[in-house]
Structures are given as C-alpha cells and as structure tokens.
Image (cartoon, grey):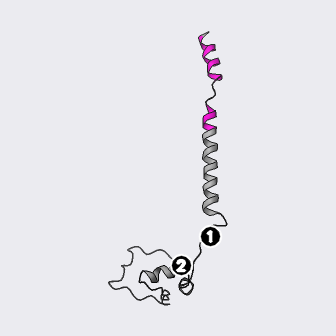
Amino acid sequence: MTKNSSIKRRSDRHGGTPLLVALAVATCGMLGMLIVDHGPWNKPKVKPAEMAMHTTTGEAARAAGATVIPTDPKPPLEPVPPGPKPVHPANPPAPP
C-alpha cells in the first residue's frame, strides 16, 4: 500500500511549470536584446576626416584644441622587422 501511494503522490507533481516560465522569459529577453543591438536601424556610421570637420565631432575637437586629419595610408610593403630571422623548424613539413 505504501508503494502505490508514493507513486500516486509523485504523478500529481507539477514541477515543470516554473522551468517553462523561466525558459520563456529568458528566450524573450535574448530575442529582445538581439533585436535592439543588431536591428537594421543600428548600423555603424563611419565618417571620413573631411566630413568630420563639419560635424559636431570636428567642432568639439577644434574647441578642445585638437585637429582632425586623415589617417596616413598604409605602405604597400611592410619594412623588414629588426632582429634575427626566425629559426626553421627541426622537422620541416613533408611536401604534398
């Protein structure tokens, strides 16, 4: 008789409802953050230095005593780094 009563009490439990509610809240929160952070209205706006001279960023920089100039272009060839050359591996890879 004790065996049947313990099985009956166990089958009447509803422990999954709080878990489902927590899962639904977490899912809605994650979707909300993704929509707010990565929506079509939140694109990065990069401005060249010439355009920045005439916007509030350029005005604020000049008011603080700074100058807005374009970045120097990267040279096509990088210079050789100073120091010794790296050592070749003891076991070179086998050719294919």
Does residue 18 lie above or below 24 as drawn?
above
Q: Decide: few, some or many residues near mark 1? Use Cα within 10 Å; few <14, some 14-19, many ≥20.
A: few
Instruction: Find residue 15 and report its horizontal and vertical position in percent.
Output: 61, 30
Q: Which numbered disc flags the more N-terminal residue, 1 or 2?
A: 1
Q: Residue tagged by mark 2?
A: 56
Q: Is residue 23 magenta?
A: no
Q: Residue tagged by mark 1?
A: 43
Q: Nearer the viewer, residue 48 or 93?
A: 48
**CB under 8 Å between discs 1 and 2:** no
Residue 37 position by quadrant: bottom right
Instruction: Say what amino acid the circle numbered 1 marks.
Output: Lys
Instruction: Say what amino acid the circle numbered 2 marks.
Output: Thr
Q: Main secondary structure of the magenta part?
A: helix
Q: Alpha carbon of mark 1 to alpha carbon of mark 2: how far?
A: 19 Å
Instruction: Find residue 81 and report its horizontal and vertical position in percent.
Output: 37, 85
The residue that appears at 62% across and 59% down in the rendered structure is 36
Q: Secondary structure at mark 1?
A: loop
Report the span colored magenta: 2-20
The residue that appears at 63% across and 33% down in the rendered structure is 16
Residue 66 position by quadrant: bottom left
74 on left or right of 27: left
**Outermost residue to the top:** 1
The residue that appears at 46% across and 84% down in the rendered structure is 62
